[in-house]
Image (tube, helix red, strand yellow):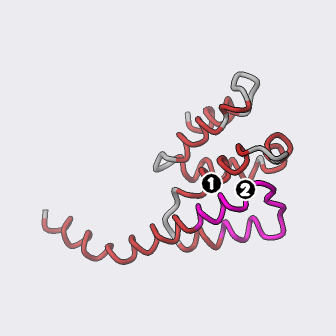
Amino acid sequence: LLQRTLTIAMSKQVRDQDVYIPVGAVSANAIGVEVAWQWFQDNWDTIVERFAGGSFLFGRITGYVVENHASMDKVAEVEAFFEGKNLYSAERSLRQALEAVRSRAARVQRDAETITGWLASQ
């Protein structure tokens, strides 16, 4: 269902200015965050062709598929993917999304032991 949502998002059924809405919804889902990231990588050329021409949508889509991750491994993966790529209007969105991921990863690392202990006591 998540993959189908992304497929429909890029179809003619969804206007360009609305594509970010289903992408954001899938990316906000605990399973969908990985689905959306893989979809973004697989469809990079199409996404660039359709949205990178000065549109704020390119930055919004880029931010959405990155910002909900929670590990430093994912930060490294994202940085490796974008290395050498023209980010057009998405540079700031990517920086902000990676900052959010780093913050979330630090929080997970900081609180993991406490939460694990609390869950074990319940």
Looking at the rendered structure, which numbered label has been put on residue 90? Answer: 2
For image coordinates 64% across by 66% down, the residue present is 95
Say what secondary structure mark 2 lies in.
helix
> How many residues crowd around disc 2 within 10 Å: few (fewer than 14), some, or many (20 or more)?
many
Looking at the picture, how far across and down is residue 41, in whole percent? 73, 54
* Front in this rendered view, residue 112 or 102: 102
**Mark 1 → mark 2, Cα distance in angstroms:** 8 Å
Looking at the picture, how far across and down is residue 100, in whole percent? 52, 64
Q: Quadrant of the N terminus?
A: top right
Let me know if residue 117 is in the magenta part: no
Query: Nearer the N terminus, badge 1 or badge 2?
Result: 1
The amino acid on which the numbered mark 1 sits, given as a three-letter code, is Gly
For image coordinates 65% across by 37% down, the residue present is 6
- Residue under label 1, please give it: 63
Q: Quadrant of the C terminus?
A: bottom left
Label 1–label 2 contact, CB within 8 A: yes
Looking at the picture, how far across and down is residue 57, in whole percent? 70, 43
Task: Say if 101 sits above or below 41 in the image.
Answer: below
The amino acid on which the numbered mark 2 sits, given as a three-letter code, is Ala
Q: Is residue 14 left or right of residue 112?
A: right
Q: Which stretch appears magenta? A: 77-98
> How many residues crowd around disc 1 within 10 Å: few (fewer than 14), some, or many (20 or more)?
many
Task: Say if 87 sits above or below 39 in the image.
Answer: below
Q: Quadrant of residue 20?
A: top right
Task: Please name the predominant secondary structure of the magenta segment in the image.
Answer: helix
